[in-house]
Amino acid sequence: MDAIILQFFNGLEKGSAYALIALGLTLIFGTLGVVNFAHGALFMIGAFCAVTLRKVFEISKVSLDPTKTDFLGKPLEVKTPYVEAWFGETIGSAMINYSVPLAILLTIPVMLFVGWAMERGLIKHFYKRPHADQILVTFGLAIVLQEIVKYFFGANPIQMMAPSDYSGTVNIGAILGMDIFYPVWRLVYFFFSAVIIGGVFAFLQFTTFGMVVRAGMADRETVGLLGIDIDKRFTLMFGLAAGVAGLAGVMYTPILSPNYHMGMDFLVLSFVVVVVGGMGSLPGAVAAGFLLGILQSFASLNEVKAIIPGIDQIIIYLVAIVILLTRPRGLMGRKGVMED
Amino acid sequence: MSNKFSRRGVLKSGAIAGSGLLLPTYLRAESHSGFTNAPTGSEVVFGFNVPQTGPYSEEGLDELRAFQLAVEHLNGEGDGGMLNTFSSKALDGAGILGKKVTFVTGDTQTKSDVARASAQSMIQKDGAVMITGGSSSGVAVAVQGLCQEAGVIFMAALTHSNDTTGKDRKANGFRHFFNAYMSGAALAPVLGNVYGTERRAYHLTADYTWGWTQEESIAASTEALGWQTVEKVRTPVGAGDFSSYIAPVLNSGADVLILNHYGGDMVNSLSQAVQFGLRDKMVNGKQFEIVVPLYSELMAAGAGSNIQGVYGSMNWNWQLQDAGTQAFVKSFGEKYGRPPSNAAHTSYVQTLLYADAVTRAGTFNPCGVVEALEDFEFDGMGNGPVLYRGADHQCFKDVLVMKGAENPTNEYDTLEIVETTPRAQVEYAPDHPMFAGGDLGQCNPGA
């Protein structure tokens, strides 16, 4: 029972990341009709915003301690972060400790800008081109972004810690009278994702801007005929989708140490999520994200693998095949999308 | 005036000349020398084939630094490093047999097919007479097989699978690095002393040759102590998120988690195991413990504070106090501003050992080199007295048992040496069951 509950929570946490990335992919596809293979790279850039902020906070003044020596027998360099020197040790160390959540403040403008620059600088030139061209150019862009990050940050994963107040475990089984401990930060990530997903849906549902975007997604031409500059709004939606991917990445860093190819690992799974949810369907992307995350976690149970060896590696693709055979438009796909 | 050059004649001549130029270097060279890529000019080319991208790239890049340092020392540049402490005095810092050492590099991407293609290119296009590199045993085994076929020497760098000098051993291949059996033989007694003999172990294992042989070796050596193996679970290389594999550990009744992971995978799996509170748990009335049988300094740095107090093993560590280690750490540290990893150490040593063998043999012919390396005993390279056993081309030397530093004082102070396990304790017979099924075969000069 404990294992099932734990895997359910693991599935929720994994599903949160899948859902956030798939949500952005669907937003871009639904508005601009672009299949964005660089979306995983946006997730990765978000993660590296957290790395960057922590590195900035850790920039230190160096002094020599003649009483100690380094590995070459020279006086040891002692590093004191400037934030501790400027704001005092308590505030300075708290800034470093909370660098991941604080990075949200950096990530939002960075990702909006990156999204805007990608759309205006490159992707807009491919709107009328076949999907194959879009995939090629965005895939190439993803590799370029990966290599840039690798150049500056190296190839190895970079360890990021959750704030110490959130780095322990919590007894999620207490309500059932059981002792089932789960990492606090993974629960934080799940709730954070729920807030972001809720925020995006509320924005599209309850604002005039969102209403126009939804109308544009349904019938771009008619909205244009009404004198509304739908392209401008869609560009902003690209920025919003990039922002969602970036936020998903920044908060994921204490769970998975960031490395330059982390986005590609998530991208493939997120595309499967989009297809299973239904191309162009935002609720479908979210529902499929959580569904596949949970299924993948349950498939990792030793008892399940004892019956079907290797099922944890193929479950997502197996589900995708079954869904596409029985519901070719995906769980919540709209008629006419990707069917021409 | 008639034109002497007909169109057909020019085309014919061009085709013949082009074919000659396109002929691989090693085919052109061997025709007059009797072995692949025999150096004919004033230079000799080495091929450094390491992962510069992918999950083991940090190790690969450190290997590359060490290779370059070794080439400098062989050519008489720098302070000479371990050439000053090496027990063999055949090398004089004037290249090898009067030829200046040059090199080409390749990126294996930690993929066997890419690594083979890269090595093939080095042999055929660049004329490399020796290939070295590693960081993944799957890659090392694949490239070793290629070198055997092509008739060049393969000096394996970072490869820890028993298979490299076990069932996949080759006459043209040599390994200085220790192996999974040796890790188990060195580590198990220490684990028994620290954690007792009544433990229940759960293995998470990278699903490829290195993971399999390490799992087999560690399970055998800990079971010999009296430990029980509760479960052996295989995980894909580069899985990233191991939470789905870690959650079942909590209810398995195990009180020790053995992570047969390396590089980025180990950083992630260890960090996530700590996140799940494994090290804070009491199971079977005992504190839950994590063991990482194969350590590297680069992994330890990546795992940060999660590694504190976690036991593992290493081939070598920069904190050793012998003259060879100190000479190498000084050379490497002054050139690169950081201490070398044990991947760097084995890469450097293998390059010098090859050069020394060529010099003693008086030829670059692979069969001469094989003869010079087999059963060669040496010292002064940081591991105490070492034997390159002729029966399987595996080096035998002391093994280090390490522990994550409890109170690190600087960024490089991540691991501490717990014990130097003597060579005799990690030796085994060439036909030991874990190494059975292999055959060195005959050395292949490629001619």
Image (spheres, rainbow, N blue to C red):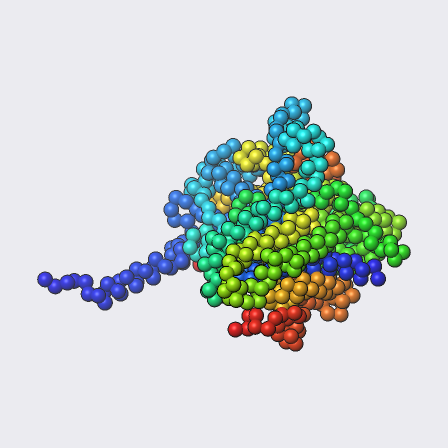
Q: Residue at x 57, y 67 (%)?
A: A218
Q: Judge by depth and name the residue closer to the eye, B148 or A199.
A: A199
The residue sitting at the top extreme is: A66
Q: Residue at x 75, y 41 (%)?
A: A164
Q: Residue at x 67, y 55 (%)?
A: A199
The residue sitting at the bottom extreme is: A326
Place residue B392 in its image quadrant: bottom right
The percent position of residue B300, horizontal first and vertical second, equals 67, 43
Q: Judge by depth and name the residue closer to the eye, B147 or A77.
A: A77
Q: Residue at x 60, y 39 (%)?
A: B340
> How many marks on residues?
0
Instruction: Classify residue B219 as left or right of residue B140.
Output: right
**Rendered view: B397 above or below B239:** above
Q: Judge by depth and name the residue closer to the eye, B213 or B150.
A: B213
The percent position of residue B42, horizontal first and vertical second, equals 39, 44
Quadrant location of the N terminus of chain A in the rendered image: bottom right
Q: Judge by depth and name the residue closer to the eye, A245 or B408.
A: A245
The residue sitting at the front extreme is: A226
Task: State whether residue B8 appears in this view.
Answer: yes
The residue sitting at the left extreme is: B1
The percent position of residue A304, horizontal first and vertical second, equals 76, 67
